[in-house]
Image: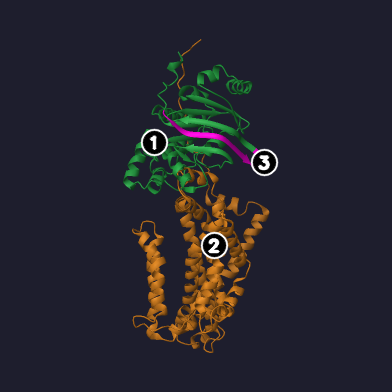
């Protein structure tokens, strides 16, 4: 009855069946798989052929790049007039103050060189000393920005903020908004989940108030109403007012994005941390926030991208950001009629920065994903 | 005859946990009713009972993951009250292992083990890492130290969770159904670690239905139903000669198959 025990031998692994398809099979299956799919393919092909090559011809091949005034563009109307952007570059990027003071143009230039010099190494995985670079970018860079761009110290003439403009202004507003809104938003989100009723109520009221008000209204109020709360004679800088308004608004949105992440953390994580004797702040800083922020990266970056573009609403209080400066330049007597080029250029810069943020966030998500098995 | 399978009872020490007249409600639901329980140092208690009987709630009261409304719980001379300092003092001395492991997924195995010693006990980092490696060796997974929890099997994760608790050098270990979420083939590796702990004299309270484990290591088996302690006895007496018909019914149901 007790026969010899069989030995289990695992069957050898085989390669999966060969499904590799040639390009022709792929095209037939994916682009012409059915009647409707074939129709869609043909329609998009037609649209692509009829719009993309003419645009490239206009924007690149026939375009005017050189020259100092509109005469070049007048002579060749078949192409875009990038001469306009070229001539007015300093105005569109740095605003009127720096564009009209050639001696001071090094200031915004230095700032952007410094910004990219700090930022680019951070994008690569293997850069050493990332911690210090981050501290430099988030902590030291804003101070350098203040001393160099605003000036007034070390013999650097003070610049007039009402004449700040162009991309420099867009950048300053978005950078300050993002930098301050993140920590404030995190505190608000934690407060909203607090067990203490007073703190919770304050945070709920704050978040719901700022989230329920359009940014345009907030900017308007910041410029008209903020001075009413301070004694006469206290003069508040217009750019500072916009920064305060944007930060208030943005922190409410960031708080909600972070709250989404917080509520996704399982109860067991809190319990395990508590059972080890970790108090509220240690629990929050080491266990809860790292996980919650990782989950909310897409929504936080989403609010940052929205903010970056929303900064153009400062035109309501008379500040000329990138978009408005491009528009202003295109309406000057010398360059009247070249609005399209102005908008395209401004749009391209917005796109480049927003796309960069988006890619960086995807990268970060992948890097922080500790659940992949490898 | 039974002494071969049952672990030799070491001398038990003084009382380390004293629970008197404990009552707890979830809203209107009376979940724990007049619980009295004394646990001696070095004692190994297995708590069993049907689901909803309050057994998990009882051990979660001991490190105040649940608050109680009546009665007193004194752990190692410290009474559990609203005072957060006392709560953290007790949590430091009481380790807990959960059904679903609850490892920190964003930290490596080693970091899971060193976080609390470094930030709660203020142990220097190097010392904490050496200690963590010792405990990871003890639960037989030192080679996984730099992996993330998501890369380990359930049994390995639960062993890391045990090592993480041990790194705080607790005086009491609470186990809340530590093997219920595991695949059958992984239960043994976790129970082995728990048996090893018991052999070293750790005071343990285990909520579990592993009756083989109870027979082998427990000094006392407690049966709960409806928020009450129905019966408690030494394992041999408990399994062979239950005194209460509810206990009999429960045992006949879980030992039937």
Using the rendered image of the protein, determine whether residue B60 is visible from the camera's viewpoint. Answer: no
What residue is disc 1 on? Answer: B141
* Residue that lies at the very extreme toward the top in this rendered image: A1
What residue is disc 2 on? Answer: A254
On whether residue A281 falls in the magenta region, the answer is: no
Q: Residue at x 49, y 32 (%)?
A: B205
Q: Position of residue A205 (x, y in %)?
A: 61, 63
Whole-angstrom CA distance, mark 2 to mark 3, is 39 Å
Q: Is residue A107 left or right of residue B228?
A: left
Using the rendered image of the protein, determine whether residue A320 is visible from the camera's viewpoint. Answer: yes
Where, quadrant-wise, is the C terminus of chain A in this rendering?
Answer: top left
Range covered by the magenta-colored residues = B13-29
Q: Residue at x 52, y 89 (%)?
A: A334
Using the image, determine if residue B183 lies above or below residue A46: above
Whole-angstrom CA distance, mark 1 to mark 2, is 41 Å
Identify the chain of the residue marked 1, using the numbered disc in the image. Answer: B
What residue is disc 3 on? Answer: B28
Q: Position of residue A315 (x, y in %)?
A: 56, 79
Instruction: Say what secondary structure mark 3 lies in.
Output: loop
Depth-wise, is mark 2 or mark 3 nearer the camera? 3
- Which numbered marker is on residue B154? none
Using the image, determine if residue A190 lies above or below residue A305: above
Q: Position of residue B88 (x, y in %)?
A: 46, 45
Quarter where residue B21 is shown: top right
Instruction: Say what secondary structure mark 2 lies in.
Output: helix
Q: Is residue A223 left or right of residue A286?
A: right
Query: How is the protein colored in the picture?
Result: by chain
Question: Tell me, what hue is chain A?
Answer: orange
Given residues A327 and A189, the one toward you in this image is A189
Depth-wise, is mark 1 or mark 2 nearer the camera? 2
Depth-wise, is mark 1 or mark 3 nearer the camera? 3
């Amino acid at each position: 009855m007790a026969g010899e025990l069989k030995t289990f031998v695992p069957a050898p692994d085989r390669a999966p069946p060969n499904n590799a398809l040639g390009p022709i099979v792929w095209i037939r299956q994916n682009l012409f798989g059915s009647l409707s799919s074939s129709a869609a393919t043909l329609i998009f092909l037609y649209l692509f052929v009829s719009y993309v090559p003419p645009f490239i011809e206009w924007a690149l091949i026939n375009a005017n790049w050189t020259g100092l005034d509109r005469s070049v563009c007048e002579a060749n109307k078949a192409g875009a007039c990038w001469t306009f952007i070229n001539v007015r570059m300093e105005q569109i990027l740095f605003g009127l103050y720096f564009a009209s003071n050639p001696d001071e143009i090094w200031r915004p230039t230095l700032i952007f060189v410094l910004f990219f010099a700090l930022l680019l190494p951070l994008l690569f995985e293997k850069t050493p000393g990332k911690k210090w670079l981050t501290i430099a970018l988030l902590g030291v860079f804003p101070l350098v920005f203040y001393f160099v761009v605003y000036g007034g110290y070390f013999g650097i003439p003070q610049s007039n903020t009402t004449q700040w403009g162009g991309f420099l202004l867009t950048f300053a507003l978005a950078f300050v908004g993002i930098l301050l809104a993140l920590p404030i938003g995190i505190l608000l989100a934690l407060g909203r989940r607090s067990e203490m009723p007073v703190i919770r109520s304050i945070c709920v009221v704050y978040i719901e108030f700022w989230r329920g008000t359009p940014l345009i209204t907030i900017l308007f109020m910041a410029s008209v109403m903020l001075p009413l709360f301070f004694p006469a004679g206290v003069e508040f800088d217009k750019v500072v007012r916009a920064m305060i308004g944007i930060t208030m608004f943005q922190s409410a949105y960031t708080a909600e994005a972070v709250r989404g992440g917080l509520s996704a953390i399982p109860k067991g994580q809190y319990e395990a941390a508590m059972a080890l004797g970790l108090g509220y702040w240690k629990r929050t800083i080491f266990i809860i926030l790292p996980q919650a922020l990782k989950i909310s990266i897409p929504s936080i970056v989403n609010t940052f991208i929205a903010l970056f573009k929303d900064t153009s609403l400062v035109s309501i209080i008379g500040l000329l950001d990138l978009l408005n400066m491009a528009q202003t330049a295109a309406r000057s007597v010398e360059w009247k009629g070249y609005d399209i080029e102005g908008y395209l250029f401004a749009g391209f810069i917005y796109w480049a920065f927003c796309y960069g943020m988006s890619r960086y966030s995807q990268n970060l998500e992948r890097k922080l994903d500790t659940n992949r098995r490898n | 005859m039974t002494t071969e399978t049952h672990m030799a009872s070491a001398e038990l020490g003084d009382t380390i946990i004293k629970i008197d007249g404990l009552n707890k409600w979830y809203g209107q639901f009376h979940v724990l009713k007049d619980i009295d329980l004394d646990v001696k140092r070095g004692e190994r208690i297995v708590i069993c009972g049907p689901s909803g009987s309050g057994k998990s709630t009882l051990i979660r009261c001991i490190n105040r993951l649940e608050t109680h409304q009546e009665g007193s719980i004194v752990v190692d001379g410290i009474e559990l009250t609203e005072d957060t300092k006392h709560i953290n003092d007790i949590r430091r001395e009481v380790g807990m292992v959960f059904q679903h492991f609850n490892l920190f997924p964003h930290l490596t195995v080693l970091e899971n083990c060193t976080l609390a010693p470094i930030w709660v006990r203020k142990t220097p980092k190097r010392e904490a890492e050496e200690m963590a490696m010792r405990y990871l060796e003890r639960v037989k997974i030192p080679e996984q130290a730099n992996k993330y929890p998501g890369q380990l099997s359930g049994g390995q994760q639960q062993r890391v969770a045990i090592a993480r608790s041990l790194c705080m050098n607790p005086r009491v270990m609470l186990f809340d159904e530590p093997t219920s979420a595991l695949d059958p083939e992984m239960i043994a590796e976790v129970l082995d670690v728990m048996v090893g702990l018991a052999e070293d004299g750790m005071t343990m309270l285990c909520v579990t239905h592993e009756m083989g484990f109870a027979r082998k290591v427990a000094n006392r088996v407690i049966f709960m139903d409806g928020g009450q302690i129905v019966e408690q006895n030494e394992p041999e007496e408990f399994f062979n000669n239950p005194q209460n018909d509810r206990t009999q019914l429960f045992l006949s149901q879980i030992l039937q198959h």
